[in-house]
């Protein structure tokens, strides 16, 4: 399956990076256990490259996901009960064994959120003893700027309102419909984000 990919670049030089790098499979390795590294795209002030920057899971985000999960579970339970009740009034050969598509999608969404919350909590707990600030995953510098959240405006190219530290050019995001079907190699780090 291909993934829609944004291209982050600079108007003053040939520096660029695909948003696909956010899904590269960065992980912390702690006592033979892997924990997901959460990243956002940004620019490093030391290596001056556009590259994924480490971000730490926040308690507020985890709490919000848990509330969303509770709401969706309640909706799933209610709709499933209605489905089961409707099935009870039918004869055995008329009953539908499979859940309707909407219920199946809601169930999948609950499972996805549950897994995401679990991964975020594990990473949050693993980082509890962390000393260093979030780092550039290319060079390890803590001097970086995260890009603002991208909202598709319908333009092929949007300016991010930031200057490139290397050349002073404008940093841009290009949304040209590019889709890639590649899986970048996983890259491991210790808990202080030093590359293994």
Image (cartoon, grey):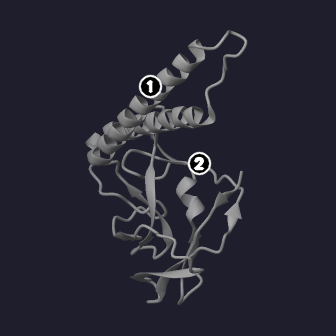
- Depth check: give the residue in front, 42 or 129: 42
Q: Residue at x 46, y 76 (%)?
A: 48
Horizontal relation, residue 155 to residue 97: left or right: left
Q: Position of residue 121 (x, y in %)?
A: 36, 37
- Depth check: give the residue in front, 99 or 131: 99
Task: Indicate the quadrant where residue 17 lies.
Answer: bottom right
Question: Cα distance, mark 2 to mark 1?
Answer: 38 Å
Q: Residue at x 40, y 70 (%)?
A: 148
Query: Secondary structure under badge 1?
Result: helix
* Residue that extends furthest to the top in the rendered view of this protein: 92
- Number of the front mark, 2 or 1: 1
Q: Mark 2 or mark 1: which comes first in sequence?
A: 1
Q: Position of residue 63 (x, y in %)?
A: 29, 41
Q: Residue at x 46, y 59 (%)?
A: 137
Query: Secondary structure under badge 2?
Result: loop
Q: How many marks?
A: 2
Q: Is residue 156 shown above or below 22?
A: below
Q: Position of residue 135 (x, y in %)?
A: 38, 60
Q: Can you see residue 111? A: yes
Q: Position of residue 72 (x, y in %)?
A: 42, 36
Residue position for label 2: 186
Q: Residues within 10 Å of mark 2 (few under 14, many from 20)?
A: few
Q: Can you see residue 126? A: no
Q: Which mark is residue 161?
A: none
- Depth check: give the residue in front, 190 or 20: 20
Q: Which mark is residue 77?
A: 1
Q: Is residue 152 shown above or below 67?
A: below
Q: Residue at x 36, y 42 (%)?
A: 65
């Amino acid at each position: 399956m291909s993934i829609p990919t944004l291209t982050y670049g600079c108007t003053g030089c040939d520096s660029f990076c695909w948003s696909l790098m956010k899904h590269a499979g960065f992980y912390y390795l702690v006592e033979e256990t892997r924990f997901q590294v959460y990243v956002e795209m940004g620019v490093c002030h030391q290596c001056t490259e556009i590259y994924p920057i480490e971000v730490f899971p926040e308690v507020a985000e985890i709490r919000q996901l848990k509330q969303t999960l509770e709401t969706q579970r309640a909706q799933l339970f209610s709709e499933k009960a209605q489905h089961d009740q409707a099935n009870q009034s039918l004869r055995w050969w008329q009953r539908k064994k499979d859940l309707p598509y909407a219920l199946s999608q809601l169930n999948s969404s609950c499972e996805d959120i549950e897994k995401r919350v679990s991964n975020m909590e594990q990473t949050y707990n693993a980082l509890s003893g962390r000393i260093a600030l979030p780092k550039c995953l290319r060079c390890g510098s803590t001097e970086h700027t995260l890009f603002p959240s991208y909202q598709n405006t319908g333009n092929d190219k949007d300016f991010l309102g930031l200057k490139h530290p290397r050349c002073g050019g404008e940093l841009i995001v290009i949304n040209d419909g590019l889709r890639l079907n590649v899986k970048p190699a996983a890259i491991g780090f210790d808990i202080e984000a030093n590359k293994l």
